[in-house]
Image (cartoon, rainbow, N blue to C red):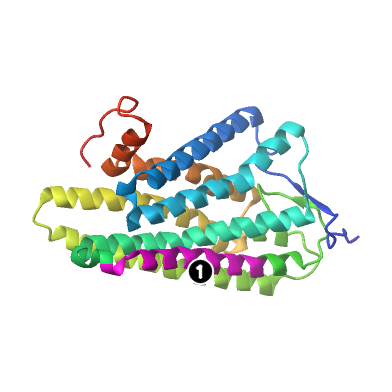
Amino acid sequence: MELWNSSTWGSSFILVGILNDSGAPELLCAMITFLYILALASNGLLLLVITMDVRLHVPMYLLLRQLSLMDLLFTSVVTPKTLLDYLRRENSISFGGCALQMFLALTLGGAEDLLLAFMAYDRYVAICHPLNYMIFMRPRVCWLMVATSWILASLSALGYTVYTMHYPYCKAQIKHLLCEIPPLLKLTCTDTSRYELMVYVMGVTFLIPPLAAILASYTLILFTVLHMPSNEGKKKALLTCSSHLTVVGMFYGAATFMYVLPSSFHSPKQDNIISVFYTIVTPALNPLIYSLRNKEVMGALRRVLGKHLLPTPSAF
């Protein structure tokens, strides 16, 4: 087989995403555009509200602000190029651009993975140890959690990106929405089975401990909630946690499919659908899930935008 020269920064890949493999690409393009605008508006508004309203300057909302920032950046790494490529009928991405997109996507995905675990710990402390909440979740601890999420994720992403892009590639057509490890490895000229095993092991190592911490936190929270004497307290705690668990389920479901399931379970069409879900759909839904049922966020939104623009929120 003739070797396609992919080892230089001037070479290009061809991204054959979901819009190129759809029976109704115009409709799908319109839906993706709507979801991207929704993601920009909802995450941007949540960032604005949390930043401007001093009543939300508490650990829970500091972490939520970081989640909105990650979602906003994650979808912006992928969606604008996908839409522009479809409109221009030009699907190429340079070797360097592919490497950069992979690094950013892995960094943001990994940071969100760790941040969701820290958010579960925050809810555990708030519900199970409320009197010590501001001790365990003091500002220095919160910023350490945020910094840990970004630093560990970026270091992991750098290692993955450098090693993945060092392979020689025999094909240029990536049958995927973005540059990610599994679809890229299918284009290499060499045996990558050992590296695929390492990606699988590292994927399990990076995903399972945070997920186990989340499950442990919410198990302890459930036991505490069941022993609460107040029904109102139970309702408030369960509603707060249900929002987080919904986001956790969407994120970890997609991440597990892409990086934990063996390659034999993957197909280009399935991978494209899953990638749309976690790069476009989830970032648009996350701020809505967290804000619509949250009395404090809705109250802050009314204060920031004006009391006459939004209806009075119902009880939390």
> Does 119 sit left or right of 44 as displayed?
left
In this rendered view, identify the residue nearer to me: 230 or 188: 230
* Above or below, 286 relative to 251: above
Figure quadrant of residue 203: bottom right
Amino acid at dot 1: Phe
Q: Position of residue 302 (x, y in %)?
A: 32, 33
Figure quadrant of residue 32: top right
In this rendered view, identify the residue nearer to me: 300 or 94: 300
Q: Position of residue 62 (x, y in %)?
A: 39, 55
* Above or below, 297 relative to 62: above
Figure quadrant of residue 304: top left
Q: Position of residue 242 (x, y in %)?
A: 30, 50
Residue 219 visible to an observer of this rendering: no
| Pointer 1 local density, CA inside 10 Å: few below 14, some 14–19, many at least 20 | some
Looking at the rendering, the stretch of residues picked out in magenta corresponds to 135-160
Q: How many numbered circles are shown?
A: 1
* Above or below, 76 relative to 180: above
Give the overall secondary structure of the magenta segment: helix
Work out which residue is located at the far right of the displayed protein and give it.
2
Q: Residue at x 74, y 64 (%)?
A: 165
Q: Residue at x 65, y 60 (%)?
A: 103
Q: Position of residue 65 (x, y in %)?
A: 43, 51
Residue 142 highlighted magenta (yes or no): yes
Q: Residue at x 64, y 29 (%)?
A: 24
Residue with the mark numbered 1: 206
